[in-house]
Amino acid sequence: MDRTRLSRRTLLSGLSASLCLWDAPLNCAFAALPGDRRLVVVILRGAVDGLAVVPPHGDKDYAGVRGVLALQTDGATPLHDLDGMFGLHPALANMKSLFDAKELIAFQNICSPYRERSHFDGQNVLETGASRPHAVSDGWLNRALAPMGLADGPHALAVAQTPPLLLTGAAHATSWMPATMPTPDPAFLAQVKLLYDRDPVLSRALDDALALQNMAMLASDDPSDKKMGPGAAANLTPLFAGAGRLLAGNQGPRVAVLDISGWDTHVNEGAGDGALARRLTALDGGIDAMRVALGLAWSKTAVVMATEFGRTAHPNGNGGTDHGTGGASFLLGGAVSGGFVRAEWTGLSQGALKDGRDQPARTDLRGLFKGVLAEHMGVPASALNSVVFPDSGTVAVMNGLIRA
């Protein structure tokens, strides 16, 4: 130890990537809760093409509007038909299975209140739950933790280096990421623990980090879950599987956020294959990995997937799509009463498109969020309309989303 000249600060810095240590100590032993329902919010950052993930293939104008991006009902990569009008992208095979099991609801023509085309402002509105950008400084999910009874302890988890705006606020939230470095061997950890033995702050921080990491790795024999290096960004399985294992624990968190970027498809988006298809394949695999990792807890889980806005109906000159307005979202999980598409569909004719280019936003995303919080997590309407989503009294709470 003298020869390597390892200081406490150096050790903390070096271990933080592989053991998920935090600058401030926190208790990673999540306390037992009165309820056992789980809520997961997946942010698809970058504006997902809603007409690609939930293609309205039964619309008479669909093929003409989408052009080279139109998905086919036959051929090498056929879309998954849902109801004759709407389908799922070919890459979403696991999500199609959830739909067939009545554990998935697809939404079309849905969007936050934001109507411009800035990623930065759109994501701010999506995460704060406000009616305009930068109206409030904390996240709607953080504000919902107190009405859920989850504000006094690390019951909310961000699968990220730091909690995103969605989980930022007065209520406590913590973060976790799969290791980006090889796990230190037991002999090295024993030396570190001996070094920290007389420092209660550093000793507790190390113990807590190891406890959370061990909880995440429990029952996993997949090497891909043990290391996710910089080159593995497209592999979402470690993120989703790790979150699932943490949520599955009797003393694990009950709310989690996954922040998935890479959906800004201006160039070479592709139809049944291509850049978007590869990203959707990773997402679909991640969702299934979470389902498996949750085990029996899957039946008590609801997962909301949302993006900041949609994309243009017509492809651009680079084989991609530009920033739009309305788009698609998903609600899935064993607790979901699904098996249908919810859409106030107005068609894809030129007159039906916003500004002649975008899907119109016919449904406010906050109505979906409200419905899940009310039916699944027991948040009262009074809190939804004032604390969680300020100035949203005119946005109706969706119902019929969660199994009785």
Image (cartoon, grey):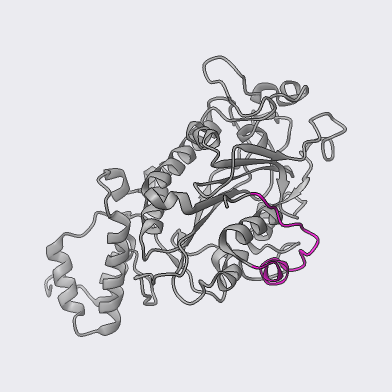
Residue placed at 53% from the left, 20% from the top? 77
Residue placed at 55% from the left, 38% from the top? 102
Residue 141 spot, x, y in % from top left = 58, 64
Residue at the far right in the pictured view: 351
Q: Tell me which secondary structure the magenta stretch mostly adopts.
A: loop
- Quadrant of the image occupied by residue 359: top right
Q: Is residue 199 above or below residue 192?
A: below
Residue placed at 51% from the left, 36% from the top? 101
Residue 151 spot, x, y in % from top left = 52, 74
In depth, the one of 195 and 158 nearer the eye is 158
Quadrant of the frame with the N terminus:
bottom left
In depth, the one of 247 and 307 nearer the eye is 247
Residue at the far front in the pictured view: 404
Q: Is residue 279 visible?
A: yes
Q: Is residue 323 visible?
A: no
Q: Is residue 75 left or right of residue 313?
A: left
- Quadrant of the image occupied by residue 352: top right
Residue 318 spot, x, y in % from top left = 65, 29
- Which residues, given as a range, are shown in magenta? 380-400
In depth, the one of 142 and 354 nearer the eye is 142
